[in-house]
Amino acid sequence: MTCPFCNNLMEEGIIQSSQELSWKKGIKRPVFGRAVFHDDSIVLSKLSYMKGSAVKALLCRKCMKVIIDCADKGSDLNH
Ligand SMILES: [Zn+2]
């Protein structure tokens, strides 16, 4: 895929964590608690106690942006 910002070819990779990976609406600093406790949040990768969490992500090394396709259930490597 090419970057929608600069048309550079994007690189496939993953973002991983030892905690659940989620997007939380309106939060501007790290907070504790799973997405289920925050309204309108989206789980990017469910937590596996054996593997942690991981989500596929595309990196544009030119403009240093990362894209995660939340609509693709295959993006969550623990789904
Ligand atoms: Zn770019």
Image: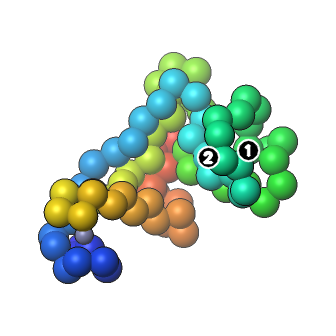
Measured Cα–Cα span from mark 1 to mark 2: 6 Å
Which one is nearer the viewer's eye here, 47 or 25?
A: 25
Instruction: Give the residue pinned by disc 1.
Output: 35
Which amino acid does the dot numbered 1 rest on?
Ala
Q: Nearer the viewer, residue 77 or 68?
A: 68
What residue appears at the point 51 percent right and 41 percent down from the top-left corner? 78
Mark 1 Cα shell of 10 Å, populated few (<14), some (14-19), many (≥20): some
Provide the secondary structure element on which disc 1 rests: helix
- Identified at 38% across, 52% down, the residue is 56
Q: What SS does tag 2 mark? A: strand
Image position of 18 with respect to 25: above or below:
above
Q: Find disc 2 in the rendering and name its residue.
A: 22
Q: Quadrant of ligand 1?
A: bottom left
Q: List x then y, in percent, for residue 5.
A: 30, 77
Is the CB–ligand 1 distance for label 2 below 8 Å? no
Q: Report the residue that reaches farthest toward the front.
A: 28
